[in-house]
Amino acid sequence: MSSSTSLVTRLSPSSPLINGTGTAGLAPTDRSAGPRRPRGRYQWPTGAPATVVEDFDPPAVVWGRGHRGVDLAAAEGTQIRSAAAGTVAFAGMVAGRPVVSIDHADGIRTTYEPVEPAVSAGDTVAAGQIIGTLLAGHRSDGVCALHWGARTGPKTYINPLRLLQPAVIRLKPLH
């Protein structure tokens, strides 16, 4: 586990990096493949900042072992929202799990699972629009979590946390 991964996975919900007073859970380095994207166009698919229970871990080779997204802790039944405006590319079952994928105008495709879809392929969605309901069963450790993935092409996965709006930091005098 790299130092950037351990930093993110050890944060608590009250941490400034998770609760919106820091840098939105971003690790100091990003090991994602592909071009860097400007931050600020996307929002949390859970509707609010969430604890990262498993960080992005890109594979060394295209079909190699890794974690091609992040797992965000959320209660079963949480309404999941589109992280940005786009068009639903897919809403259905993949390997026995319900998945929603959305294509965005900047060429990024975001994926959400296990999400019972409230949308259909071809639907246009707004940023923050409810796209479905989180189901249990994604993780074997019993933690209910949304797997949120992002990619710029069929094989180029990026860390979706890098897409989030940066938190505004205001310094105030101590006295």
Image (cartoon, rainbow, N blue to C red):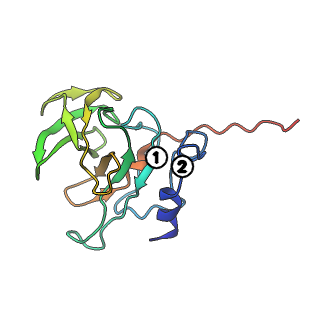
Q: Quadrant of residue 67?
A: bottom left
Q: Quadrant of residue 167?
A: top right
Q: CA distance from mark 1 to mark 2?
A: 7 Å
Is residue 96 or residue 21 the one in the foreground?
A: 96
The answer to whether the residues at label 1 and label 2 have Cβ atoms under 8 Å apart is yes
| Image quarter of the N terminus | bottom left
Q: Percent from the top left, x then y, of residue 39?
A: 46, 44
Kindly identify which numbered label has been placed on residue 12.
2
In the figure, 37 relative to 175: above or below? below
Residue assigned mark 1: 51
Residue at point 29% right, 58% down? 68
In the figure, 45 relative to 57: above or below? above
Q: Which element type, helix, strand or loop, lies under badge 2?
A: loop
Q: Residues within 10 Å of mark 1 (few under 14, many from 20)?
A: many
Is residue 154 or residue 58 the one in the foreground?
A: 58
Kindly identify which numbered label has been placed on residue 72.
none
Q: Percent from the top left, x then y, of residue 46?
A: 38, 36
Q: Is residue 7 left or right of residue 126?
A: right
Q: Percent from the top left, x then y, of residue 75?
A: 36, 37
Q: Amino acid at mark 1?
A: Thr
Q: Amino acid at mark 2?
A: Ser
